[in-house]
Amino acid sequence: MAADWTTPADLVTQVQRLWERGEILRASLTGEALFPKLLRLSRPSTQDSGSRFEEVRKWIAALKDGAEAHGYVVEFEEVAHRQLGRNEFPGRVLIQTEADALRMIAKTRAAERFRALREETIAAFPSLDAWIVDHPMKVVEHADRWAGHLAVLKWFVEHPRSGLYRRQLEIEGVDTKFIEDHRQLLTGLLEAVLPPAAVVGEPGSWFDTRFGLREKPSLVRFRLLDERDHIQGLSDLTIPTADLARLEFPLEDVIVTENEVNGLALLPRPRTMVVFGQGYALETLGQVRWLGAKRLLYWGDIDTHGFAMLDRFRAHFPAARSFLMDRETLLAHKLMWVAERTPSTEPLTRLTEPERALHRELLRGTHGERLRLEQERITFRWVREALLAL
């Protein structure tokens, strides 16, 4: 038979897709008249009936047998053929009822389970009625774990903005791994059941932030390059960012560098701190407001991502200066150039005019295609001289 003639298996697939898209369950909730449902039928042409008569006969027989096995209905129509005369030919295929469709794809029990879970859910959280209509297959997909989801919802409704770590939650039958594994689904459910006052921030925020849990603190590492500023003899420390925000040192210069070896290699220097950057996470340093009162230097790679991070850093510290991110440094280290894998094209609005010009040259490939000078490839003598020039 021709590959484009509809087979019984094709008809089952069409109904299966109705199920997977949630259309069958959604129609049962909204009262939409989905059934009888007309299925797509690709059939032999009139020419095929004459030239491929035996194949067409077998196709009709297979369609009839499929109707017996799967419960769909084949409606025939009379077709006139100049050689074969008048014959009954399949015209339409329908699924008469939802029950027929569910039996056809073996989903009767799944639909019954869905309805039971929906009733249980609406009884506990009436506001979820609309959410279930929009996402019936989420309930089906998570049916075996739905009791855990309801337990989580109940806890958050009873303990809004608790300020606890996720590990501290006492929810029967639910551990912290459950919340981690299902946080995307739980986010949608919680946003539907919690009052606005119990939800923090904008949609898309981190789960713990969004629902009032205590987050794991961000950490920042720094070195104090002046022995007079050491804390009980310690010069290299890692502490929560919030703690650093409460500690102010008698500093003049703060150098933020993205490369760990750079931070370790910098030599003793009066009233200077070096802060180890965290890539695009360096924005957490925005909590340390006293940094803005120092001479603040940002030292990143000379590439499009380095300038993007500088731009973001200046959102918190507009007066921050770039360090060794200039054309002179770039051109003096031609032997150290490498290729940037995927250049950033995000618009940057906080660069100085010289920085903006060099960034534009990098994007245009003025000095070389996808050019990059990593900060650790700059000779250390060049670094020492730049620091002395400050």
Image (tube, rainbow, N blue to C red):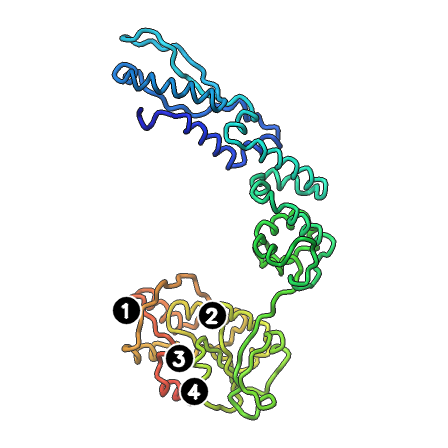
> Circle 2 sits on which residue?
279
SS at mark 2? Answer: loop
**Can you tell which of label 4 and label 2 is closer to the viewer?**
2
Instruction: For the C terminus, give its image quadrant.
Output: bottom left
Crowdedness near tag 4: few (<14), some (14–19) or many (≥20) residues, C-alpha within 10 Å: few
Residue contact between numbered discs 4 and 2, judged by CB atoms under 8 Å: no
In the foreground, 161 or 255: 161
Identified by mark 1, the residue type is Gly
Quadrant in which residue 360 is drawn: bottom left
Q: Residue furthest left?
A: 51
Q: In this rendering, is residue 76 above or below 181?
A: above
Q: Which mark is residue 387?
A: 4
Graded by Cα atoms within 10 Å as few (under 14), some (14 to 19) or many (20 or more), the crowding at tag 2 reads some
Name the spot of residue 246 as percent of width and height, x first: 64, 78
Q: Judging from the image, what secondary structure is the residue with disc 3 in?
A: loop
Q: CA distance from mark 1 to mark 2?
A: 24 Å
Q: Residues within 10 Å of mark 1 (few under 14, many from 20)?
A: some
- Element on which disc 1 rests: loop
- Give the mark nearest the N terminus, 3 or 1: 3
Q: Mark 2–mark 3 contact, CB under 8 Å?
A: no
**Disc 1 versus disc 2: nearer the observer:** 2
The answer for how far apart the CA atoms under marks 2 and 3 are is 17 Å
Amino acid tagged 4: Leu
- Whether 324 is drawn above or below 306: the answer is below
Q: Position of residue 95 (x, y in %)?
A: 50, 23
Q: Which residue is mark 1?
A: 368
Q: Which residue is mark 3?
A: 324
The quadrant of the rendering that contains the N terminus is: top left
User: Which residue sits furthest right?
Assistant: 158
Is 202 displayed left or right of 59 in the figure?
Answer: right
